């Protein structure tokens, strides 16, 4: 069956994202085919497009979305045709239809809009494992969250507050400061133009000189030094992304003088390794949305053919919340 899809024929800038007719195969045993209603745009898609982390060309990018089951493969009984599902790891999601393993299709509760589900899962399950497994946040702790107005940042702020932490957030603009405070941040630092040392000094001032228990850093190279300098002794730096570039090679001996610090580099593949773990985390995220614990901000909606514009906007860090493609 033919559908419209974004195809990457060669690695490069946003201009290599081309809308093309593409054949979509029938679902095999244990698979489903879904009519895609919304697609999440992620930094991982940019890494794919540029060849940093990508399949061989040509390929259809994208990993996250939501829609309605259009056809069931042999042996699929847990889902039904017409049922709404969301997913977080289905290659080829920048398309009007996608085939994925049925066990990775997460049922969407009736009160949750389909586009909200598409906007929630990748960052939602990331925020879940970061705050519940990588560093289980406890009531009364101090947490520093960089880029707190981004898709993952806003969810981290909300979950850390839900768990009872005091949240210090960093952002780059006045608009983003309002968003971070609206999500529950107790303190907000406008780091644009501040050196790493001044940013860390402000964090320590806000924590009575102690530093924070944990830093959640998805920015990478631009914030790494400030993150280390903001930690209390035996604190943990959770480096989960590299929006500003990869952190250069690092001398582990520095962790001693800084207070016997911990640094970890978690990735979703190790925290969503089984369908059961994915369903548990994704189900919790969708449940929190249904209960009003999490508010998902959609920062922009683009037609499928506008994928290049969405990538450019995301890479520039001009956006807030989650960007969606609408086939």
Image (cartoon, rainbow, N blue to C red):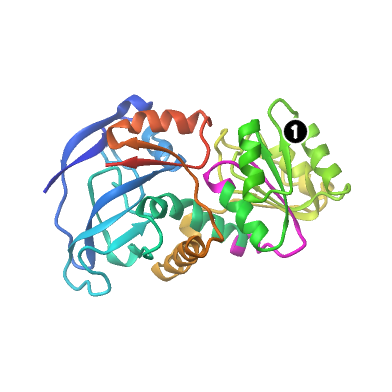
Mark 1 neighbour density, 10 Å: few (under 14) some (14–19) many (20 or more): some
Residue sitting nearer the eye, 53 or 24: 24
Residue 49 part of the magenta-drawn span: no
Residue sitting nearer the eye, 3 or 25: 3
Taking the spot 59% from the left edge, 46% from the top edge, the residue there is 153
Indicate the position of residue 103 as horizontal and vertical percent values.
32, 67
Indicate the position of residue 45 as horizontal and vertical percent values.
40, 40
Q: Which quarter of the rendered picture does the C terminus lie within? A: top left
On the rendered structure, is 137 left or right of 309? right
Indicate the position of residue 65 as horizontal and vertical percent values.
35, 51
- Element assignment for label 1: helix
Where is residue 34, by image quadrant? Answer: bottom left
Indicate the position of residue 173 as horizontal and vertical percent values.
64, 30
Residue 144 part of the magenta-drawn span: yes
Taking the spot 59% from the left edge, 57% from the top edge, the residue there is 130
Residue 172 appears in view: no
Stretch in magenta? 132-153
On the rendered structure, is 16 left or right of 215? left
Tally of numbered discs: 1
Residue sitting nearer the eye, 42 or 118: 118
Decide: is 71 above or below 97.
below
Residue 15 appears in view: yes
Q: Which residue is mark 1?
A: 196
Where is residue 274, by image quadrant? Answer: bottom left
Decide: is 225 above or below 208.
above
Taking the spot 77% from the left edge, 35% from the top edge, the residue there is 199
Taking the spot 37% from the left edge, 50% from the top edge, the residue there is 115
């Amino acid at each position: 069956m033919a559908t419209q899809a974004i195809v990457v024929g060669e690695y490069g800038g946003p201009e290599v994202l081309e809308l093309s007719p593409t054949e979509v195969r029938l679902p095999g045993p244990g698979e489903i085919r879904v009519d895609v209603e919304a697609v999440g745009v992620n930094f991982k898609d940019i890494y794919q497009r540029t060849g940093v982390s990508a399949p061989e060309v040509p390929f259809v990018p994208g990993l996250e979305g939501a829609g309605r089951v259009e056809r069931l493969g042999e042996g699929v009984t847990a889902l039904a045709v017409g049922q709404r599902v969301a997913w977080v790891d289905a290659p080829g999601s920048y398309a009007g239809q996608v085939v994925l393993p049925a066990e990775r299709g997460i049922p969407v509760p009736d009160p949750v809009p389909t586009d909200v589900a598409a906007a929630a899962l990748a960052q939602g399950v990331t925020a879940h494992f970061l705050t519940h497994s990588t560093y289980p946040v406890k009531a009364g702790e101090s947490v520093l969250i960089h880029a707190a107005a981004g898709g993952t940042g806003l969810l981290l702020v909300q979950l850390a507050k839900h768990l009872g932490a005091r949240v210090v957030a960093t952002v780059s603009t006045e608009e983003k400061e309002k968003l971070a405070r609206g999500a529950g941040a107790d303190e907000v630092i406008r780091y644009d133009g501040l050196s790493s040392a001044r940013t860390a000094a402000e964090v320590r001032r806000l924590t009575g000189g102690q530093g924070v228990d944990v830093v959640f850093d998805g920015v990478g190279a631009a914030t790494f030094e400030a993150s280390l300098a903001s930690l209390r002794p035996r604190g943990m730096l959770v480096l989960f992304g590299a929006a500003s570039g990869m952190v250069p090679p690092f001398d582990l001996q520095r962790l001693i003088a800084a207070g016997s610090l911990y640094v970890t580099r978690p990735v979703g593949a190790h925290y969503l390794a089984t369908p059961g773990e994915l369903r548990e985390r994704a189900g919790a995220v969708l449940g929190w949305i249904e209960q009003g614990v999490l508010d998902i901000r959609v920062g922009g909606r683009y037609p499928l053919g506008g994928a290049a514009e969405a990538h450019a906007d995301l890479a520039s860090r001009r956006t807030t919340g989650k960007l969606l493609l609408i086939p």
